[in-house]
Amino acid sequence: LPRLLADHCPATRFAIITDTQVAALHAEAVRAALSARTDVLVATFPAGEKSKTRETWAALSDRLLEAGMGRDAAILALGGGVVGDVAGFVAATYLRGIPYVQLPTTLLAMIDSSVGGKTGVDTTAGKNLVGAFHQPRLVVADVATLKTLPSAHLAAGLAEALKHGAIADRPYFERLVAARDRLMDRDVGELASAVTESVRIKVLVVLGDEREQGRRSILNFGHTVGHAIETASGYSLLHGEAIAIGMVVEASIGVQLGVTDRGDAHALTSALEQFGLPVSVPAGMDHDHLLDAMGHDKKARAGVIRLSLISKLGYPAKRDGESWTTAISADVIRKALRNTG
Ligand SMILES: NC(=O)c1ccc[n+]([C@@H]2O[C@H](COP(=O)([O-])OP(=O)(O)OC[C@H]3O[C@@H](n4cnc5c(N)ncnc54)[C@H](O)[C@@H]3O)[C@@H](O)[C@H]2O)c1
Ligand SMILES: [Zn+2]
């Protein structure tokens, strides 16, 4: 870490921003890795999505101001996606922007949220509504930190990894399934190659198109339905768990339309199940309510529900000259929700 920082993010002072849970487990190792001569502040906030607010952003900014951090300082965001998003937003705005480094400690943060430069906080009107693009100077994903991550969070991260395989790389998808036991046992070699492959796919897709309605919308596979389910669960489902169900529903929609290969849809469901992920819409969820939420999804255009489907495992559904997304009727979605119940 000190060598990487010297090369990519030299600073005379560092603020380690982390949450209470990660602080207890990993903050000391990071602090110890920095030279004794370096001035280090550790600023923590209570773990959990409920802390991803403007209030936390303000409190952290005030901590840095009180410590007299200047433009020669840099922020180290140590934790999961919540820490990365809030700390990144502090870095984006503090003194009109200072450098920062992502030190992700959840699999989701390693393969998704630490890459791409999106930072921000939630408001009562919805998630991620206030924020900024601010690229980290460096992302250091030490998969050894995943040894302390609860299994449900590890599996939820693997749902996103399986998504990467499903939209872009079938052999990767199959390797993940074959490596299930080693991944869940937190074999560092296996985890490191999954992080490498997933980041490679995310970067290729994002670089392939800077615009959300273009090719990068394939990253939304499972997310339009998944977000609605995540919200309807009152966030009792982890993001990756809701996305697992979302992928199963969206694959079933694709099968109905003759777009998605039926055998591959089954293979996807079975893979998610093998990782202990949920694959059916929770009983008691109101399907009309879910449809309503999908229409209000940030990415829905003018209330029309458009989905990024796959044709086969490893291939997004797109024929030459057509859109990366497909408009889907409410009836087709209702039927898929019923079939997946
Ligand atoms: N910026 C982006 O592009 C982007 C993309 C996807 C998701 N996100 C955001 O990411 C957030 C979710 O991230 P998350 O799932 O990492 O949640 P999180 O940051 O809340 O972490 C989950 C829990 O695990 C704990 N934890 C973290 N690392 C640990 C470790 N190594 N050992 C033990 N416990 C550990 C945390 O304290 C927390 O309680 C959401 O707010 C979402 O909006 C952002
Ligand atoms: Zn996601």
Image (tube, rainbow, N blue to C red):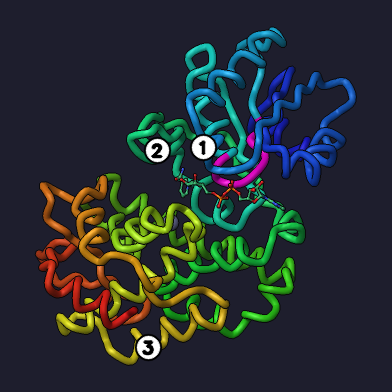
Quick one: SS at disc 2?
A: strand
Q: Give me the C-alpha separation between circle 3 and circle 2.
A: 33 Å
Classify the position of the C terminus by image quarter: bottom left
Residue found 70% across the figure and 58% down from its top = 149
Q: Please, what is the three-letter code of the amino acid marked with disc 2?
A: Asn
Quick one: SS at disc 3?
A: helix
Q: Please, what is the three-letter code of the amino acid marked with disc 1?
A: Asp
**Could you tell whether 191 is left or right of 99 in the image?**
right
Residue range corresponding to the magenta coloring:
76-82
Q: Please, what is the three-letter code of the amino acid marked with disc 3?
A: His
Q: Which residue is mark 1?
A: 85
Q: Give me the C-alpha separation between circle 2 and circle 1.
A: 9 Å
Badge number at residue 107: none
Q: Earlier in the sequence, mark 3 or mark 2?
A: 2
**Could you tell whether 32 is left or right of 194 in the image?**
right
Where is residue 51 drawn, in percent x and y?
56, 35
Task: Confirm if mark 2 falls within 8 A of ligand 1.
Answer: yes
* Foreground pick, 101 / 106: 106
- Residue 56 appears in which quarter of the rendering? top right
The question of residue 89 being in magenta is answered with: no
Residue extending farthest to the right is 36
Q: Which residue is mark 3?
A: 266
